[in-house]
Amino acid sequence: MLERTDLRPAPATYFQQIVRRFGDSVATRAAILEDTGVGEGDVDDVPAEITLAQQLRQFDNMNRLFGEGWALSAPELWRPAAHGALGVAVSSAPDVGSALHILARYIGAHTPNQHLKLVRAPGSVLLRHDIAMELDERHARIMAEGVLLGVASLLSLMLGRAQLDLRFDYAWSEPTYGAKLTEAVGAEVRWNAPASGVAVPRRLLTLRSPLSNAALCHHALELLEQSVFISAGPEGVKARVQQLLARSDDGRVAAIMAARSLGLSQRTLARRLAEAGVTYRELADAELKARASRWLTAGVLSKAEIGERLGFADATGFSRACRRWFRT
């Protein structure tokens, strides 16, 4: 099975959805999971993330079992509800232009190793799709098709019949299921294009969304910002943990609560921090040390008061910590 350690892991939700949607028998589920490293009894207990190699192997299995274009028979895999916070943020954005900027900014948090970039074109803007690695055409095609089907579904909520004015570009020749793909995106399709993406006429950018909701969009964007930290890799997870600790009242956050806040299992959090060369306990200890140093230097609070603010059970515990931190 292909292994690429330089690529970011992906959320396991899509992997699980495919098994649940197409695995109508024990034999079929086993075939979908073949050589992915995930057993049938483990599907519901897959870690929060899987490797790109596991996802691509599952795609190969699906192509072998159901033929290319199988995703077109399961629109629930790419409709807005499948996109979580990204789907909410795009749908509730004030206008089409804002929705495109949200897609370009946050698609990597939803589908790591893939990017959408806004590029100016005569009379339109192109939301161009890129993949952060060299893949053979069958893998590149299925990844691009999945992302652009999701984009089409999200924009359809805002555009209605104006969806017909879009153009979807694919950087390969028309496959056997091309007519079905054209019907699914609900717009013009151009094959053998210089790059894959969707061209949106500029006159549509200011079109107001009928689902615009400022409060809902703001909340969804906050969740996506958190995902950006996580999708940035181990250093991003480390930075997000440091933020959580810095914002807490006493500098303390239980590891399990921090993991939940980040949408990770405690085991995955520990692994990502280990990849950054640090443990959760070390980060928590560093935050307490920094606060103690600031308050001791200020000289406004007594040691007992500082210890209490930092959540130590008694002055003795705080004194021991100070000797460890400051060698005094």
Image (spheres, grey):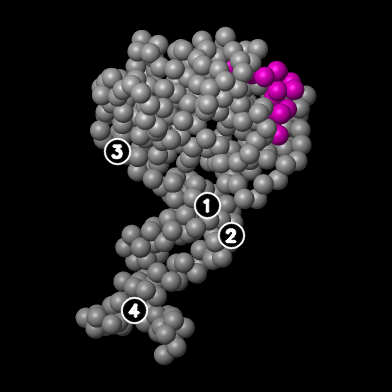
The verdict on residue 202 being magenta is no
The Cα–Cα distance between marks 2 and 4, rounded to whole angstroms, is: 28 Å
Q: Quadrant of residue 165?
A: top left
The label shown at residue 275 is 2
Between discs 3 and 2, the one toward the N terminus: 3
Residue marked by disc 3:
218
Q: Nearer the viewer, residue 198 or 219?
A: 198
Between discs 4 and 3, the one toward the N terminus: 3
Residue shown at the point (28%, 78%) measured from the top left: 295
Q: Quadrant of residue 309?
A: bottom left
**Is residue 282 visible to the viewer in this orientation of the structure?**
yes
Q: Nearer the viewer, residue 44 or 2?
A: 2
For label 2, the SS is helix
Neighbor class of circle 3 (other Cα within 10 Å; few <14, some 14-19, many 20+) is some
Instruction: Report if the CB atoms under discs 2 and 1 are less than 8 Å apart.
Output: yes
Q: Quadrant of the C terminus?
A: bottom left
Residue marked by disc 4:
293
Measuring from the top left, give residue 180's x and y in whole percent. 57, 11
The Cα–Cα distance between marks 3 and 2, rounded to whole angstroms, is: 31 Å
User: The magenta stretch spans which residues?
Assistant: 57-73
In the picture provided, is 219 more to the left or to the right than 258?
Answer: left
